[in-house]
Image: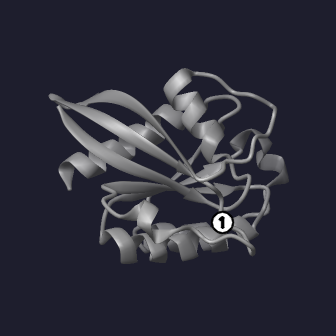
Amino acid sequence: MIQKKICMLGGFAVGKTSLVARFVHSRFSEKYLTSIGVKVERKSLEIGLQEVNLMLWDIYGEDDFQKIRTSYLKGSHGFLLVVDGTRKATLEIARRLRGSAEEAAGQVPFVLALNKSDLEDAWELDEAELKALETAGWPIVRTSAKSGAGVEETFRELARRMVAG
Protein backbone atom coordinates (compact mmCIF):
# COMPACT_ATOMS: atom_id res chain seq x y z
CA MET A 1 0.00 0.00 0.00
CA ILE A 2 1.21 3.47 -0.79
CA GLN A 3 0.26 6.58 1.12
CA LYS A 4 -0.48 9.96 -0.49
CA LYS A 5 -1.08 13.33 1.13
CA ILE A 6 -3.73 15.52 -0.52
CA CYS A 7 -4.34 19.10 0.57
CA MET A 8 -7.84 20.53 0.14
CA LEU A 9 -7.40 24.15 -0.91
CA GLY A 10 -9.87 26.92 -1.64
CA GLY A 11 -11.52 30.04 -0.36
CA PHE A 12 -13.74 30.38 2.66
CA ALA A 13 -16.97 28.29 2.50
CA VAL A 14 -16.39 26.73 -0.93
CA GLY A 15 -17.23 23.22 0.33
CA LYS A 16 -13.85 21.61 1.09
CA THR A 17 -15.03 20.02 4.35
CA SER A 18 -18.32 18.94 2.75
CA LEU A 19 -16.50 17.26 -0.14
CA VAL A 20 -14.27 15.35 2.29
CA ALA A 21 -17.30 14.32 4.41
CA ARG A 22 -19.16 13.13 1.31
CA PHE A 23 -16.14 11.19 0.01
CA VAL A 24 -15.00 9.60 3.29
CA HIS A 25 -18.29 9.16 5.18
CA SER A 26 -20.94 9.44 2.40
CA ARG A 27 -22.73 12.23 4.23
CA PHE A 28 -23.65 15.89 3.81
CA SER A 29 -24.80 18.41 6.38
CA GLU A 30 -26.59 21.69 5.68
CA LYS A 31 -24.96 23.14 8.82
CA TYR A 32 -21.88 25.21 8.05
CA LEU A 33 -18.91 24.66 10.34
CA THR A 34 -15.83 26.79 9.78
CA SER A 35 -12.60 24.79 9.61
CA ILE A 36 -9.98 25.92 12.08
CA GLY A 37 -6.45 24.81 11.29
CA VAL A 38 -6.29 21.37 9.67
CA LYS A 39 -8.39 18.23 9.98
CA VAL A 40 -6.95 15.02 8.53
CA GLU A 41 -9.18 12.22 7.21
CA ARG A 42 -8.16 8.95 5.55
CA LYS A 43 -9.65 6.77 2.84
CA SER A 44 -8.19 3.91 0.85
CA LEU A 45 -8.84 3.34 -2.85
CA GLU A 46 -7.72 0.80 -5.40
CA ILE A 47 -6.10 2.44 -8.38
CA GLY A 48 -5.33 -0.21 -10.94
CA LEU A 49 -3.69 -2.99 -8.94
CA GLN A 50 -2.35 -0.57 -6.33
CA GLU A 51 -4.01 0.15 -2.96
CA VAL A 52 -3.64 3.84 -2.17
CA ASN A 53 -4.20 5.28 1.29
CA LEU A 54 -5.23 8.92 0.89
CA MET A 55 -4.55 11.32 3.74
CA LEU A 56 -6.88 14.26 3.14
CA TRP A 57 -5.73 17.48 4.76
CA ASP A 58 -8.80 19.70 5.05
CA ILE A 59 -7.20 23.13 5.51
CA TYR A 60 -9.10 26.24 6.59
CA GLY A 61 -10.28 28.49 3.75
CA GLU A 62 -8.29 31.44 2.55
CA ASP A 63 -9.82 34.90 2.43
CA ASP A 64 -8.67 38.52 2.71
CA PHE A 65 -7.92 38.12 6.41
CA GLN A 66 -6.41 34.66 6.56
CA LYS A 67 -3.72 33.15 4.33
CA ILE A 68 -2.81 29.46 4.07
CA ARG A 69 0.30 28.43 5.97
CA THR A 70 2.68 26.99 3.43
CA SER A 71 4.01 24.58 6.08
CA TYR A 72 0.70 22.66 5.73
CA LEU A 73 1.44 22.14 2.04
CA LYS A 74 4.93 20.66 2.40
CA GLY A 75 5.10 16.97 1.57
CA SER A 76 1.87 17.01 -0.43
CA HIS A 77 1.59 14.55 -3.28
CA GLY A 78 -1.35 16.42 -4.78
CA PHE A 79 -4.02 18.98 -4.06
CA LEU A 80 -7.66 19.58 -4.78
CA LEU A 81 -8.49 23.20 -5.57
CA VAL A 82 -12.13 23.84 -4.68
CA VAL A 83 -14.18 26.68 -6.17
CA ASP A 84 -17.74 27.67 -5.29
CA GLY A 85 -19.46 28.03 -8.65
CA THR A 86 -21.87 30.59 -7.18
CA ARG A 87 -19.00 32.94 -6.22
CA LYS A 88 -16.69 33.99 -9.07
CA ALA A 89 -14.09 35.44 -6.66
CA THR A 90 -13.30 31.94 -5.37
CA LEU A 91 -11.78 31.05 -8.75
CA GLU A 92 -9.19 33.80 -8.37
CA ILE A 93 -8.39 32.52 -4.86
CA ALA A 94 -7.88 29.05 -6.36
CA ARG A 95 -5.46 30.48 -8.94
CA ARG A 96 -3.40 32.10 -6.17
CA LEU A 97 -3.48 28.96 -4.04
CA ARG A 98 -2.17 26.87 -6.92
CA GLY A 99 0.90 29.12 -7.01
CA SER A 100 1.40 28.83 -3.23
CA ALA A 101 0.98 25.06 -3.36
CA GLU A 102 3.52 24.67 -6.14
CA GLU A 103 6.03 26.86 -4.30
CA ALA A 104 5.71 24.66 -1.20
CA ALA A 105 5.24 21.19 -2.73
CA GLY A 106 6.62 21.49 -6.26
CA GLN A 107 4.90 20.39 -9.46
CA VAL A 108 2.46 17.87 -8.02
CA PRO A 109 -0.85 16.75 -9.58
CA PHE A 110 -3.99 18.74 -8.86
CA VAL A 111 -7.63 18.86 -9.88
CA LEU A 112 -9.89 21.92 -9.91
CA ALA A 113 -13.30 21.04 -8.43
CA LEU A 114 -16.13 23.38 -9.42
CA ASN A 115 -18.35 22.69 -6.44
CA LYS A 116 -22.06 23.29 -5.92
CA SER A 117 -23.06 21.94 -9.33
CA ASP A 118 -26.53 21.38 -7.85
CA LEU A 119 -26.84 25.20 -7.98
CA GLU A 120 -25.49 25.59 -11.52
CA ASP A 121 -28.33 27.94 -12.49
CA ALA A 122 -26.88 30.45 -10.00
CA TRP A 123 -23.24 30.07 -11.07
CA GLU A 124 -21.14 33.17 -11.70
CA LEU A 125 -18.28 31.37 -13.47
CA ASP A 126 -17.33 32.40 -16.99
CA GLU A 127 -17.32 29.41 -19.37
CA ALA A 128 -14.66 31.04 -21.58
CA GLU A 129 -12.36 31.43 -18.58
CA LEU A 130 -12.90 27.80 -17.60
CA LYS A 131 -12.18 26.70 -21.18
CA ALA A 132 -8.93 28.71 -21.10
CA LEU A 133 -7.88 26.95 -17.88
CA GLU A 134 -8.64 23.54 -19.45
CA THR A 135 -6.61 24.51 -22.52
CA ALA A 136 -3.75 25.46 -20.16
CA GLY A 137 -3.84 21.91 -18.75
CA TRP A 138 -6.00 22.37 -15.66
CA PRO A 139 -8.08 19.22 -15.03
CA ILE A 140 -11.57 20.49 -14.17
CA VAL A 141 -14.50 18.56 -12.70
CA ARG A 142 -17.96 19.61 -11.56
CA THR A 143 -18.95 18.40 -8.12
CA SER A 144 -21.76 18.68 -5.62
CA ALA A 145 -21.02 17.72 -2.03
CA LYS A 146 -24.77 17.97 -1.43
CA SER A 147 -25.88 15.47 -4.08
CA GLY A 148 -22.60 13.55 -4.28
CA ALA A 149 -22.30 14.18 -8.03
CA GLY A 150 -18.71 13.92 -9.24
CA VAL A 151 -17.20 13.57 -5.76
CA GLU A 152 -15.86 10.00 -5.91
CA GLU A 153 -14.69 10.53 -9.50
CA THR A 154 -12.78 13.68 -8.52
CA PHE A 155 -10.77 12.00 -5.76
CA ARG A 156 -10.16 8.94 -7.97
CA GLU A 157 -8.89 11.16 -10.80
CA LEU A 158 -6.48 12.93 -8.45
CA ALA A 159 -5.31 9.59 -7.00
CA ARG A 160 -4.71 8.23 -10.53
CA ARG A 161 -2.63 11.29 -11.39
CA MET A 162 -0.56 10.95 -8.21
CA VAL A 163 0.10 7.22 -8.73
CA ALA A 164 1.03 7.77 -12.38
CA GLY A 165 3.10 10.84 -11.63
Residue visible at 76% across and 47% down in the picture: 120
Residue visible at 81% across and 33% down in the picture: 31
Q: Quadrant of the C terminus?
A: bottom left
Residue carrying label 1: 62
Q: Kindly tell me whether residue 128 is visible in this rendering.
A: no
Q: Is residue 97 above or below residue 17?
A: below
Q: List x then y, in percent, for residue 11.
A: 67, 62
Q: Nearer the viewer, residue 157 or 81?
A: 81
Q: Nearer the viewer, residue 11 or 134?
A: 11
Q: List x then y, in percent, for residue 91.
A: 65, 68
Packing grade of label 1 (10 A; few <14, some 14-19, many >=20) is many
Which residue type does callout 1 highlight?
Glu
Residue visible at 43% across and 40% down in the picture: 155
Q: Nearer the viewer, residue 71 or 22?
A: 71
Q: Kindly tell me whether residue 99 is visible in this rendering.
A: yes
Q: Is residue 77 above or below residue 144?
A: below
